[in-house]
Amino acid sequence: MTHHFDALILGGGAAGLMCAIEAGKRGRRVAVLDHADRLGKKILISGGGRCNFTNLHCQPENFLSSNPHFAKSALARYTPADFIALVEKHRIPYHEKALGQLFCDRSARDILAMLEEECRAANATIFLNTRIQEVSRTTEFVLRSRTAEFQAPALVVATGGLSIPKIGATSFGYDLARQFGVKIREPWPGLVPLVLDAEDRSRYCELSGVSAEVTASCDGQQFREKMLITHRGLSGPAILQISSYWKKSEQVSIDLAPEAEPTAIFRDPKTPRTLTTLRSEFRKTLPARLADRWLDHHVPDSWTNAALADFERQAHAWAIVPAGTEGYEKAEVTCGGIDTDELSAKTMESRKVPGLFFIGEVVDVTGHLGGFNFQWAWASGAAAGRAL
Ligand SMILES: Cc1cc2nc3c(=O)[nH]c(=O)nc-3n(C[C@H](O)[C@H](O)[C@H](O)COP(=O)(O)OP(=O)(O)OC[C@H]3O[C@@H](n4cnc5c(N)ncnc54)[C@H](O)[C@@H]3O)c2cc1C
């Protein structure tokens, strides 16, 4: 059986659904094809089940890409306010958490139901459980599954990244890009916990569950947020954020006492220069168990001014070289992807292969933690949907 459409959208996640809605609203006959048994599985598990669907303070600086200017156009033409208007039209209750992050009051299911309803209103056709075995291009794109053939002059690839394979992530988008000679930037897991080396694990992982506000830095970037010790390493927002910038064997620096000066007390000549005093000062900036454990491994060599200054310096720049990350199994996003030089920033269409579009996480644009990845999915999906 052969189905004809104006456009085929491969992947029914955040970006693919937004693209279908925008194109359908403009009268295009579009089909969304997904190998999963339901749409938007990642939306459902996002934001701890409450979907952090956008961020009020979305700026191009909140994204990693080998071309930092690429995302600007799409982000400017579909803004957080546009998505909020849609959420409000559907009367979905939401709230702002810290730092402009908007979450559903009830459940991420509200966002998925909204997108499904908009797809219906836009007459988009959905094909679930559809595994595409072959893609070719003659005058049109032809996609073959075991039981059907789909043809259209335009193909939008919205198959996402490699994160969380157990809910259906595949390398399909990257493979298709290679098939059509579209360059990709080697992907790597982002927003992912870091694994400590064996020595640091034995020192700190016993404290699994302890968290502290720190500033984590790497590759010229820094994030001041919570850090959490896990049974294999470090996690929490500060670490997830910096993980996207981390490359194997690079150092991550952690300021354990941002804006504090644990050794300041020793400027008073009456203060006894003892470990007990230093411990009690350090406990003012860190949870006691972490302060004590870190101090056990960083006791000052002596109580001279120079040794105390060295301790202070180390506390503000705890240098760790992680053994690795928890990988795609735990990564919230995939960094890298379709090289933005290959795409029109306005429409997401391939410069080399007319009619072929790439949107969402499969593209080399990755947001920080905090609703930015969905905003990119909505914005890039809308950009392509308006161009179909
Ligand atoms: C646990 C978790 C929590 C997250 N929380 C947030 C959050 O709160 N806020 C935020 O902004 N971002 C969050 N993210 C990131 C966000 O979910 C993604 O960036 C976003 O979903 C990307 O949208 P997408 O449409 O590009 O890809 P996806 O949403 O991954 O959709 C891709 C679709 O393509 C389908 N597909 C894949 N391969 C094939 C194939 N071969 N054939 C057919 N279909 C295929 C998949 O089944 C899926 O439906 C979270 C991610 C995770 C893993």
Image (cartoon, grey):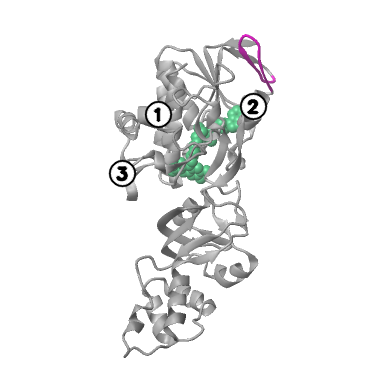
Mark 3 neighbour density, 10 Å: few (under 14) some (14–19) many (20 or more): few
Q: In this view, does 46 lie above or below 248?
A: above
Q: In this view, does 313 lie above or below 174?
A: below
Left or right of residue 131: residue 52: left
Residue bearing mark 3: 95
Residue bearing mark 1: 73
Say how many tags the image has: 3
Give amino acid for label 3: His
Give amino acid for label 1: Ser
Q: Which residue is drawn at 39% across and 35% down?
A: 110
Give the structural element (helix, strand or loop) at label 1.
Answer: helix
Give the structural element (helix, strand or loop) at label 2.
Answer: helix
Left or right of residue 98: residue 35: right
- Per the rendered image, the range of residues in magenta is 134-146
Q: Give whichever of discs 2 and 1 has the lower sequence position.
A: 1
| 341 drawn magenta | no
Residue bearing mark 2: 176
Say which of marks 2 and 3 sits in front.
2
Give amino acid for label 2: Leu
Q: Give whichever of discs 2 and 3 has the lower sequence position.
A: 3
